Image: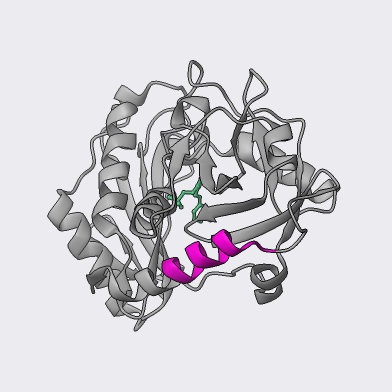
C-alpha cells in the first residue's frame, strides 16, 4: 500500500511519523474520513472545506492548498489501484517538544491513507440496529466544539466502549443538558408524523457530510426536514430512526434502550432515503 506522507507517496512500511508529533502526544490535529465509490470521491470539496475549517479553528496551517489537497487525495487512490475505498486525510501539528506549546512545532504533517473499509454487516441494513444511550456525555461546545473533527476522539471512544459493554454497535450520546447530540461516529435522525428531525450542530453534533446529503435528499423527495432539540423520549416514540455517517452511510435503527422504535423494523422513509443515498454516491463525486 502506498501512503501519501508530506509530499511523497511512500510504502506503507516507510510511512512513519515521529513519537514527538503532537498529533500523537496530544491528539493535536484534524482529520477527514472520505469515501471513494466506483472511482468517484464522494463530496470531496465539502470534506476539504470541513478539514480547512477544523484546522482554522485550532490555528493549524494546512501545508497544501485546496487544489493540491484534492490532487494528492486522487493520486493516493490511483497509486493503490482503488475504485472503492475509505480515505483518511490527517493533518497533525507536527514534531515539537514534550510540552503543549503548538508554536514550538514548526512543520505540520499531512498524510493520506486510502484503504478498504469494514462496513456494518449487510443484515443490519436490512433488519436495523439495536442501540443504547451511554452514560458518557458528548463534550460541550464551550469545552471543544463538536464541529471540529479533531484527533481527540477519546470522548467518542469511551462511548463506543460503553456501547459494546451493553452489547450494541453504536451509542446515542447526550449533551450536558440531556439532549441527544449524536452517536460515536454517526449523526442521528428520526421520522415522526411524516417529518425528518435531527439535532442541530449546537447540540453537540458534527456537521456530517452524510447528514448534509440527507438534507438534500429530503428536499429532493419532498419530505419535510428540520433541526430540533431531541430527547431520548423522542427517539423511543418516533416512527423511524436512522443514523448517517461516511462509514455507516444510512443505517436503520429499530431499537433504543430496549424499546422498539415504530414497527421495530426499518421504516419506509428510511428505506427511501437509503435508496436515494446509494444512487447519489454512484453519480456524484470527483473522478480520481
Ligand atoms: N459524528 C461524529 C462524531 C463522527 O466522527 C459523523 C458524525 C458523521 O459525519 P460524516 O461527515 O462522516 O457524515 C462522524 C464521522 C471511523 C470513521 O473511522 C468515523 C467517521 C467517519 C468515517 C470513519 O470510525 N466519523
Is residue 214 left or right of 169 when viewed as pictured?
A: left
Q: Residue furthest front?
A: 193
In the image, residue 85 sits, relative to residue 59, either above or below, namely: below
Where in the figure is residue 13, as x and y percent of width and height?
46, 69
User: Residue shown at 73%/33% (left/top)?
Assistant: 233
Which is nearer the eye, 180 or 165? 180
Q: Quarter of the image holding residue 1?
A: bottom left
Counting the numbered discs, the total is 0
Whether 283 is drawn above or below 169: the answer is below
Q: Which residue lies furthest to the bottom in this view?
A: 81
Which residue is located at x 59 percent, y 45 percent? 193
Q: What colour-coding does the image apply? A: one colour
User: On the picture, is 15 further left or further right than 63?
Assistant: right
Residue 106 location in percent, x, y?
26, 33
Prevalent SS, magenta region: helix
Query: Is residue 248 in view from this perspective?
Result: no
The residue range painted magenta reads 266-277
Q: Where is residue 37 in the image (x, y as percent from the top left)?
A: 38, 75
**Residue at 21% from the left image edge and 60% from the top image edge:** 70
Q: In the depicted view, which residue is nearer to us: 161 or 79?
A: 161
> In the image, residue 229 lies at what x, y percent?
56, 27
Vertical side of 5 occupied by 119: above or below? below
Residue 137 shows in this picture: yes
Side (left or right) of 127 relative to 218:
right
Residue 37 counted in the magenta span: no
Q: Quadrant of the C terminus?
A: bottom left
Q: Depth check: 178 or 220 in front?
A: 220
Above or below, 266 against 224 in this view is below
Instruction: Identify which residue, 199 or 121, lies in the foreground.
Output: 199
Amino acid at each position: 500500500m502506498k501512503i501519501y506522507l508530506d509530499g511523497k507517496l511512500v510504502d506503507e512500511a516507510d510511512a512513519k511519523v515521529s513519537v514527538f508529533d503532537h498529533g500523537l502526544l496530544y491528539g493535536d490535529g484534524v482529520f477527514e474520513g472520505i469515501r471513494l465509490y466506483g472511482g468517484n470521491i464522494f463530496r470531496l470539496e465539502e470534506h476539504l472545506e470541513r478539514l480547512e475549517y477544523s484546522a482554522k479553528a485550532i490555528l493549524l496551517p494546512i501545508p497544501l492548498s485546496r487544489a493540491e489537497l484534492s490532487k494528492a487525495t486522487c493520486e493516493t487512490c490511483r497509486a493503490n489501484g482503488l475504485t472503492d475505498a475509505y480515505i483518511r486525510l490527517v493533518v497533525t501539528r507536527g514534531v515539537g517538544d514534550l510540552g503543549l506549546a503548538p508554536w514550538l512545532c514548526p512543520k505540520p504533517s499531512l498524510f493520506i491513507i486510502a484503504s478498504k473499509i469494514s462496513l456494518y454487516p449487510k443484515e443490519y441494513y436490512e433488519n436495523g440496529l439495536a442501540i443504547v444511550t451511554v452514560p458518557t456525555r458528548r463534550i460541550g461546545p464551550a469545552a471543544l466544539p463538536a464541529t471540529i473533527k479533531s484527533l481527540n476522539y477519546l470522548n467518542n471512544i469511551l462511548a463506543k466502549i460503553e456501547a459494546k459493554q451493553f452489547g450494541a454497535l453504536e451509542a446515542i450520546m447526550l449533551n450536558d443538558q440531556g439532549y441527544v447530540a449524536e452517536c460515536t461516529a454517526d449523526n442521528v435522525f428520526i421520522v415522526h408524523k411524516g417529518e425528518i428531525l435531527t439535532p442541530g450542530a449546537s447540540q453537540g453534533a458534527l456537521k456530517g457530510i452524510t447528514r448534509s446529503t440527507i438534507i438534500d435528499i429530503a428536499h429532493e423527495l419532498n419530505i419535510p426536514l428540520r433541526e430540533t432539540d431531541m430527547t431520548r423520549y423522542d427517539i423511543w416514540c418516533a416512527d423511524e430512526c436512522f443514523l448517517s455517517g461516511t462509514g455507516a452511510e444510512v443505517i436503520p435503527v429499530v431499537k433504543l434502550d430496549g424499546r422498539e422504535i415504530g414497527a421495530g423494523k426499518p421504516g419506509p422513509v428510511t428505506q427511501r432515503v437509503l435508496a436515494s443515498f446509494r444512487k447519489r454516491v454512484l453519480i456524484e463525486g470527483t473522478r480520481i
